[in-house]
Image (spheres, rainbow, N blue to C red):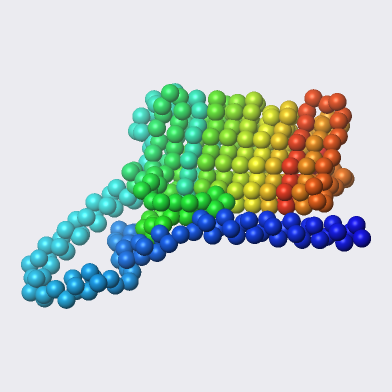
Amino acid sequence: MNAFIKNCLKIAGISILLGLFLILISFSMDNTIFSNWENFNIPFGNNNYHSGRWSNSDKEDRDDWDKNDWSNKEAEEDKNELISDNTESKGTEGNTGIRSSGNTNNLRDVKSLALDISYGTVSIKEGEHFDIQVDNIGSNDYYSTVNEGVWKIGDNRDDNRSEFSIFGVEISDSVNHPFRAANIELTIPEDFVFENLDIILNAGTIKAERLSSKNADIDVGAGSLHIEELSASEKSSYSIDTGQLVIENISAQDANINCGVGNLTAAGVINGDSLVTCGIGNVSLAINGNENDYNYNVDCGIGTVIINDNSYSGVNSKHKTNNNAKNSFDLDCGIGKIALEIQK
């Protein structure tokens, strides 16, 4: 009888959460995306293509058109202007290997890094000095500045659009998209330690060889972030919506991990008081050490929390383990799964 009641409660809990999820989506949706369908403009390459449904004003303009309004002379002038515009745009939009500011002296003052990517591909490697190479976008489509020691890098998004977010995925009511993603290559001096490391990845891919900082704040929306080696000596936070975060070798203190629907995988050392929150996604941590080196506080909804050989699941399952240790893990799981493996 108890097993039957538990199964019923699980089904009821899943149904309630699914209903709330659908309600949130329905309130987020509106008809603004359809109101712009008459002006469907796609810039593709160096040309603009217009499409959409006909409106009354379009029909009136078509009826008023007279073939005599377009002379051969005017057509030839328009052709020459188009060729000139395309030539100029190729010189600005197709730049390859663009330096951040043309002045490497500014990059000598870098103490922190703030990277904000809406979509594109970013690779971060070690080298002799700071450097940035940008490909596939024009100089006006990205920014790279150093202000008070903070190196800010990102691609310029259209801030005039009305957007809403579902699990970190930004949906715009405008259909005017550039269809071009940046290719950015960053070089960080070998063994350099940032004061603060801030990474925001909405959609795209970031691959980094090694990143070291005192404080780290990493936010992944719908993209994929892969770091071979990450060190955060003081404090760090990691937020994943629908995307993926992989850290092959981590060394962190007082980590705050929040995983929505996506996946986080990390291996290495995490000390101090750490919090792991998981909604519907999956968190997998392989920590170097002994199980008795940590205290554990488990709060599980209808998901699953696994600590080495111990598994906790069920409706509103709670568990505490006090080993009088100086390190602790606070594990809060909703519907997803948290797997914590601590071994030498």
Residue nearest the observer in this picture, 99 or 13: 13
Determine whether 325 is above or below 319 in the image. Answer: above
The location of residue 72, given as percent across then percent down, is: 9, 70
- Asked whether the viewer can see residue 127, the reply is no
Q: Is residue 58 left or right of residue 34?
A: left
The location of residue 190, given as percent across then percent down, is: 56, 30
- Asked whether the viewer can see residue 62, the reply is yes
Q: Is residue 306 left or right of residue 120?
A: right
At 59% across and 28% down in the image, what residue appears? 215
Query: In terms of image quadrants, where is residue 60?
Result: bottom left
Determine whether 236 is above or below 87 in the image. Answer: above
Residue nearest the observer in this picture, 55 or 323: 55
Q: Is residue 330 left or right of residue 323?
A: left
Determine whether 259 is above or below 297 in the image. Answer: below
Q: Quadrant of the N terminus?
A: bottom right
Q: Quadrant of the C terminus?
A: top right
The location of residue 193, given as percent across then percent down, is: 57, 26
At 69% across and 57% down in the image, what residue appears? 16
Determine whether 21 is above or below 340 in the image. Answer: below
The location of residue 52, given as percent across then percent down, is: 33, 69
At 36% across and 62% down in the image, what residue appears? 35
Residue nearest the observer in this picture, 311 or 293: 311
